[in-house]
Amino acid sequence: MKLCTIGLGYIGLPTSIMFAKHNVEVIGVDVRQEVIDSLNSGQIHIEEPGLQEALEEVIEKGTFKASLKPEKANAFIVSVPTPNHNDEYKSCDLSYVVSAVKTVLPYVEKGNVIIVESTIGPRSMDDVVKPLVEEAGFVVGQDIFLVHCPERVLPGQILHELIYNNRIVGGITPECTEAGAMIYSTFVKGEIIKTNAKAAEMSKLMENTFRDVNIALANELAKVCNELEINTLEVINMANKHPRVNLHTPGPGVGGHCLAVDPYFIVAKAPETAQLINLARSINTSMPHYVVENVNKLMENVSGKVVSVFGLTYKGNVDDIRESPAMEIFEMLKEQNKYEVRAFDPHVQLDWVIEKMEQAVTESDLILVLSDHNEFKELEDANLESMKHKRIFDTKNVVMSFGNDVEYINYGNLHE
Ligand code: SAJ
């Protein structure tokens, strides 16, 4: 089988490499020349455990090639970004998907399968993508098999989850579904769940919305507990011992290109009805302000001047700073013009990010932890002696050890 993938980002690249590992001939297409050059020379451009070795393996095998142009293939997978539109309800911007489908259509032949993996608003396949394929003169379900197969892998565990997660395959017709399922059976060991395109779209959105709403609940409870001088984290741990309770973890806000984006796709399609989903979004987007407010309080009572931000990424052990609440907090603190704000993140290579932890903490009045990187778990030997005020505000509850004379603050004891 020959496969042509469009979009070599956080999902498209691991997916392409996974097929190539399983002896499928893969042409990976991207519009960024530097990404093509880097991949063809055997170097990945994103951080994901195991991916570099996997790329080297498929280049060695000769089953993967990156290119600016698509080629004829048996199947095409579209894995491009779907940001929010800048409209009232932040609806799904399908322009990259539309453009990717239009790019491949000249290469498509009867019998081919077109799969959209990008997360899309409800009904996008039926109302937008299908008409594009029909306009090109194909009968969907007879000539061309059109499928939505949403990606549902967790950054940081992508290579494992690609194989072992269950996979939802939603065709425009049952024939399309069968064709899509056949393709993923190349490497998927989880269950392949067959459905229609609309249900597949909605399932992906429901999953991320479930998580976003639950995190909003945890964030709201953290604020309430803080107001009432109750240790939230202790209570969440206790409550979670109930057999049917699974409270999520409060944090500095919800980031990434999924949870902070996808729930709006539902809201935009049913704004009158999707009240809770919309409210959850606004609770989560309020968290960076809440963190900044509390930093100001903490700094006020030591007359501090230097804040050392630990972690800029949207979550731990990844290098992704897209839609990152940590970045938002960092910017907000800087804009206030009250403190010298330093950024330290071992996963982010930018020239204004401090490389050495010692340098980031010297003369500092507060370490503000915003991402749960493994490197932040043990700060015992981090030379915190050089800090002016030895204090840590850990919004991710990740720091496990920090030395005796350090004041440690998290959402549990923020009120004290
Ligand atoms: N977060 C919290 N508290 C929690 C859990 C997460 O504040 O209890 C925050 C994280 O710090 C981060 C954000 O939420 O800022 C999202 O992180 P995440 O680990 O929950 O999820 P993502 O965005 O990395 O990946 C999600 C996953 N979806 C679900 O778990 C339902 C993944 O399976 C999807 O494939 C991915 O979205 C996607 O691409 O849509």
Image (tube, rainbow, N blue to C red):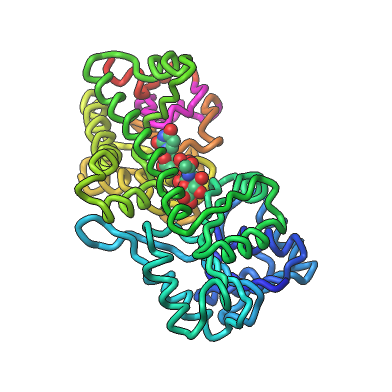
| Picture coordinates of residue 49, whole percent (x, y) | 63, 48
| Picture coordinates of residue 190, whole percent (x, y) | 66, 45
Residue 63 image-quadrant placement: bottom right
| Picture coordinates of residue 176, whole percent (x, y) | 57, 65
The residue range painted magenta reads 381-402
Residue at the extreme right of the image, as rendered: 61
| Image quarter in which the C terminus is found | top left
- Closer-to-camera residue (224/107): 107
At a point 60% along the width and 51% down the height, the residue shown is 48
At a point 55% along the width and 66% down the height, the residue shown is 115
- Horizontal arrangement in the rendering, residue 110 relative to residue 199 (left or right): right
At a point 48% along the width and 27% down the height, the residue shown is 399
Residue 233 image-quadrant placement: top left
Residue 412 image-quadrant placement: top left
| Image quarter in which the N terminus is found | bottom right
At a point 49% along the width and 65% down the height, the residue shown is 172
Answer whether residue 240 is magenta in the image: no
